[in-house]
Structure formats: C-alpha cells, structure tokens
Image (cartoon, rainbow, N blue to C red):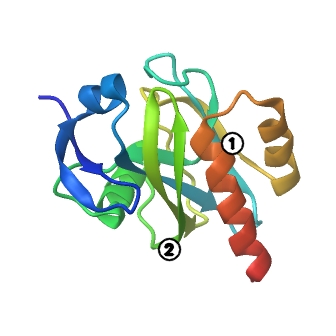
Amino acid sequence: MEEMLYHVNENDEILGKISRSEAHSKGLLHRCGVVFLLNNDGKVLINKRSSGHETFPFCYDSSVSFHVTYGETYEDSAERETEEEIKIKAPLKYIGKFLHRDPPEYQIVSVFLCIANDEPTIDSEEFLGGKFLSIKEVEKIIQNKNITPWLRDGWKILIKHLKKK
C-alpha cells in the first residue's frame, strides 16, 4: 500500500490527503522532516543516500529524513523514522521549519535535533552508510553540492540553533 501524506498550503494548513507518488508527480506541497543526530563530541551523523531512492540517490543527507505520514504529527514521524533509519531512541527537540521546492520535491520540512551518544545502526536500504563529522567537515560537504536540498536548508537552521547555545 502506498504511503499517504498530508497535502498542505504554504502556511502548513492541511488541505487533504495525497499519495507520495501524487505529491511528487504533481509537485504538491507536503510535510517532511529531518533529524540531526549529534554525539557528545559535537559531531553530526551525516548519511549518504542509497541508490534505491527515487530522489537524490547517492547524495549526502541529514541523519534521518522522512515524509510525515498522514495521521501522524511531525514529532511522531520523526521519532518513528529515527528508530527505523538509525536505531536510535532518544529525545528529539524541534528547532525550526522551512519550505523548499527542488523538483520533484515541494515540502515543508520540520527540523529536529537529537543528542545521543548511542552508536547508530544505519538502515542499509535507506543509506549507503554514514559517519560522524565535525561542523567544518559537514560545511565542506555542503559546498560540494552533492547533497539533498533538505540537508542544505536544514543545516542552516541547525547552525543557527547551535550558535544560540
């Protein structure tokens, strides 16, 4: 059965329910999210997407990225996907939201921070692998442009949040 998503407007108000394929084929705005996992050394888990992804295969990505499944909140989806994709169960903190249009994606993306020293177990269907990198190392990757747009834009929110602390 195909994954169902929220169809929303630019104010993130729900317009209805749409399939994931419909959201992408018609360029309809839908809800997504990312999680950045930081360890106690201040390093961030960055993953590389597998070839099985229809969008942005082989690109660097956040620790976890997800569509918000219809019937779930952003937080519900973030917690579930963090457990599924990297096998981490730890508190998540919402730190911001952004809108982006990078075809075929047109998304409102919520950004979450997870601080845990647990060793992640990377889902090999989702990612080719991942590693913890310093902020400077991630910024070099972002400059190289072989990244997902939600890593690019979510990173700005993460850095702004970390600078406040």
* Residue 91 in sight in this render: yes
What's the amino acid at mark 1?
A: Lys
Q: Is residue 42 above or below residue 120?
A: below
Measure how far apart labels 1 and 2 are at the Cα level.
21 Å
Q: Quarter of the image containing the C terminus?
A: bottom right
* Residue sitting farthest toward the left: 1
Question: Relative to 102, is 74 on the left or the right?
Answer: left
Q: Is residue 8 above or below residue 85?
A: below
Which one is nearer the viewer's eye here, 138 or 117?
Answer: 138
- Residue with the mark numbered 1: 131
Between discs 1 and 2, the one toward the N terminus: 2
Which one is nearer the viewer's eye here, 108 or 157?
Answer: 108
Question: Relative to 106, is 150 on the left or the right?
Answer: right
Tag 1–tag 2 contact (CB < 8 Å): no
- Number of labelled discs? 2
* Residue 123 in sight in this render: no
Q: Secondary structure at mark 2?
A: strand
- Residue with the mark numbered 2: 93
Q: Quarter of the image containing the N terminus?
A: top left
Q: Position of residue 117 (x, y in %)?
A: 61, 65
Query: Dot 1, crowdedness within 10 Å: few (<14), some or many (≥20)?
Result: some
Query: Dot 2, crowdedness within 10 Å: few (<14), some or many (≥20)?
Result: some
Dividing the picture into quadrants, the one containing residue 40 is bottom right
Which one is nearer the viewer's eye here, 134 or 99?
Answer: 99
Which one is nearer the viewer's eye here, 107 or 38?
Answer: 107
